[in-house]
Image (cartoon, helix red, strand yellow):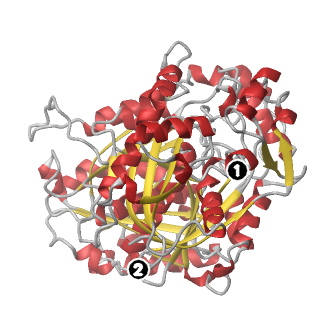
């Protein structure tokens, strides 16, 4: 049971990303053939004048975030000793947040609640959605808020997407090409089961700007990067697709990694997961950045790995939400 | 302390007797009779044909007189949604609501997967976000309410009847009224009603429901440093009156201090029950400054939650 009094006075107990797991799911779930899907979706899309796509039903296409996330939970929270061998008793997780942009095929399922029961610690669990690519950044901010107010020391963020949509689109939108999931384990320093990964690591600092027009994105992002310790020199910048297309920054100042095509909601986190072990080992400043041109959110998540003096990043980046 | 600055509610004018819903909900005449005479359900509110979820939420926000002139202070808009998927992707009523209400500058997202207890999660989360940001003037707007567009015939009869209504509230991190003293949330994913058909989760949910709901109520009260007898009023989720009377017996809590007035005339409005009942309690003069009261909610998945406030 999650039990709390009033939120504690915020303290500098930000969480650091200590480990990640990522996975592509090549096949659809058998749950995509559940006969209850058709009447549910028919009732849902009917008032909007949209038609169902019979070919997607007939193909049995689609996946369930519960099925996708569950194996990642086991993999990412498994404790390991410094030699990397599994520990029989994984440490409990206090908070689990699922972030997605497109819904899955288990339409009425409270998946985060189910996943809580499959996660060590049976954490408080919920989902964040309806915010496009910004949802995962808001999820990180909720995790930060629970940690800062004394309710969380170990959290799991699951960013998920699946590629099947069983009805026609009412307006243009990017649909994922594949079923993908990324799990990020965030811990306070000292609580990690992988202490080497935390040495000199700063907490994740998330910033969101709202009502950002496309023509303002480049300048705003450049300004944020300039505020990083050392002006962001030697930083790795992971850019979402809508940012990459319009990036006019000084490419020579940063190592730029582009989110893979076909993964609009998990792509930047996918690349973060790919590079994390090397960045943790050699020290690196990393910024994950996304822009949603429809909803107007410009989001960054900055993190610093390595032996730099702790706290530089949080001191440099203060105001978290603004327009 | 997280506080509710103001709470508003909206109920559509159209009243629909539960008999009129029987055909659509696969309810037999005898099941309708049980719902009316024993469970205490009578009628629900429904929007007029053609009205949308956006209309419902806009109407609730429109009732928030104290929002006018303070829109710039709203940093977050949280939609506390009970049903996980209700709108075709990528249609986004939440952000359209923000544009209509002059809140396009806010960070807006839906929190869900606590079923009809998502309202209490949203209050807890909003308070923590605001506290972490450190701006004493900042506010969060929570909206709740859903349209009934489908039904699940696998649910028990008294769990198939939903009403349409909406609520909205402004939350601050340091207000002086309706302050949050505690929050208890017990999630039992092993009772997930979407597990395989040959699982006994439905029976276990029914069997454990009273104890689980009573458990979070007792835990929240203890965490607030109170005794149950110090709780002036319980604002329930509007499921049937019989189940609440059973919970009260288990708690040894007087059922007349559970606001069940809205069960027969409004029904269960997903995650909006708390705000609708709060408005009713205020309008009926049931709470005085300093009174401690409790909001309880539960839903399939399963989640059981309780939150203690000081009025």
Q: Is residue A50 left or right of residue A215?
A: right
Q: Which residue is mark 1?
A: B146
Q: Is residue A288 left or right of residue B21?
A: left
Q: Which residue is mark 2?
A: A319
Give the number of the mark in front: 1 or 2. Answer: 1
| Residue found at x 65% / y 49% | A174
Q: Position of residue A183 (x, y in %)?
A: 37, 43
| Residue found at x 41% / y 34% | B211
Asked if residue A114 shows in the view, the reply is no
Residue found at the very far top of the displayed protein: B198
Q: Position of residue B281 (x, y in %)?
A: 61, 63
Alpha carbons under labels 1 and 2: distance apart = 34 Å
Callout 2 secondary element: loop
Determine crowd level at label 2: few under 14, some 14-19, many 20+ residues with C-alpha closer than 10 A: few
Callout 1 secondary element: loop
Q: Which chain does the numbered disc 2 sit on?
A: A
The front one of B171 and A213 is: B171
Q: Position of residue B275 (x, y in %)?
A: 61, 60
């Amino acid at each position: 049971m999650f039990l709390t009094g009033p939120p504690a006075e915020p303290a500098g107990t930000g969480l650091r990303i200590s480990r990640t797991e990522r996975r592509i799911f090549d096949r659809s779930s058998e749950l995509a053939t559940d006969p209850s899907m058709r009447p549910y979706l028919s009732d849902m899309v009917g008032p909007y004048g949209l038609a169902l796509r019979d070919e997607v039903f007939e193909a049995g296409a689609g996946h369930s975030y519960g099925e996708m996330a569950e194996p990642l939970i086991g993999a990412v929270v498994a404790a390991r000793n410094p030699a990397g061998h599994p520990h029989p008793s994984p440490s409990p997780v206090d908070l689990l947040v699922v972030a997605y942009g497109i819904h899955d095929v288990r339409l009425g399922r409270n998946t985060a609640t189910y996943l809580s029961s499959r996660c060590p610690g049976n954490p408080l669990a919920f989902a964040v959605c309806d915010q496009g690519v910004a949802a995962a950044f808001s999820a990180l901010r909720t995790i930060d808020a629970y940690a800062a107010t004394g309710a969380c020391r170990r959290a799991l963020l699951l960013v998920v997407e699946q590629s099947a949509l069983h009805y026609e689109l009412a307006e243009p939108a990017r649909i994922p090409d594949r079923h993908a999931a990324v799990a990020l384990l965030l811990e306070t320093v000292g609580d990690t089961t992988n202490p080497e990964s935390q040495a000199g690591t700063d907490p994740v600092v998330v910033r969101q700007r709202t009502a950002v027009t496309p023509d303002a994105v480049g300048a705003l992002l450049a300004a944020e990067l300039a505020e990083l310790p050392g002006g962001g020199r030697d930083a790795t910048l992971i850019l979402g697709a809508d940012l990459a297309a319009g990036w006019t920054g000084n490419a020579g100042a940063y190592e730029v990694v582009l989110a893979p095509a076909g993964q609009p909601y998990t792509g930047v986190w996918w690349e973060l997961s790919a590079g994390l072990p090397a960045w943790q080992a050699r020290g690196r400043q990393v910024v994950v950045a996304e822009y949603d041109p429809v909803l107007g959110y410009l989001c960054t998540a900055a993190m610093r790995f390595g032996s730099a003096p702790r706290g530089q990043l949080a001191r440099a980046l203060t105001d978290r939400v603004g327009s | 302390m997280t506080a509710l600055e103001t709470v508003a509610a909206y109920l559509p004018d159209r009243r629909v007797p539960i008999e009129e819903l029987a055909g659509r909900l696969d309810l037999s005449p005898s099941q309708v009779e049980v719902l009316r005479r024993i469970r205490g359900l009578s009628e629900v509110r429904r929007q007029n044909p053609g009205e949308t979820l956006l209309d419902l939420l806009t109407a609730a926000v429109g009732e928030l007189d104290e929002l006018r002139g303070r829109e710039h202070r709203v940093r977050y808009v949280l939609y506390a949604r009970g049903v996980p998927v209700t709108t075709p992707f990528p249609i986004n009523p939440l952000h359209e609501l923000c544009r209509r209400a002059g809140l396009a500058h806010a960070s807006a997202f839906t929190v869900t997967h606590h079923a009809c207890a998502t309202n209490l999660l949203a209050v807890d989360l909003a308070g923590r976000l605001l506290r972490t940001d450190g701006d004493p003037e900042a506010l969060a707007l929570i909206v709740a309410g859903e349209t009934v567009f489908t039904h699940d015939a696998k649910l028990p009869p008294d769990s198939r009847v939903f009403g349409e209504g909406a609520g909205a509230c402004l939350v601050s991190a340091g207000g002086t009224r309706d302050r949050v003293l505690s929050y208890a949330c017990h999630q039992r994913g092993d009772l997930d009603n979407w597990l395989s058909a040959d699982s006994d989760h439905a029976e276990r949910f029914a069997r454990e429901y009273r104890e689980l709901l009573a458990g979070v109520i007792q835990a929240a009260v203890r965490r607030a440093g109170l005794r149950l007898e110090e709780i002036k009023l319980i604002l329930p989720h509007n499921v049937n009156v019989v189940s609440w009377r059973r919970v009260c017996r288990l708690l040894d809590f007087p059922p007349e201090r559970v606001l069940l007035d809205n069960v027969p005339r409004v029904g269960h409005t997903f995650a909006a029950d708390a705000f609708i009942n709060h408005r009713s309690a205020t309008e009926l003069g049931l709470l005085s400054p300093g009174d401690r009261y409790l909001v309880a909610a539960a839903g399939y998945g399963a989640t059981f939650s309780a939150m203690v406030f000081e009025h």
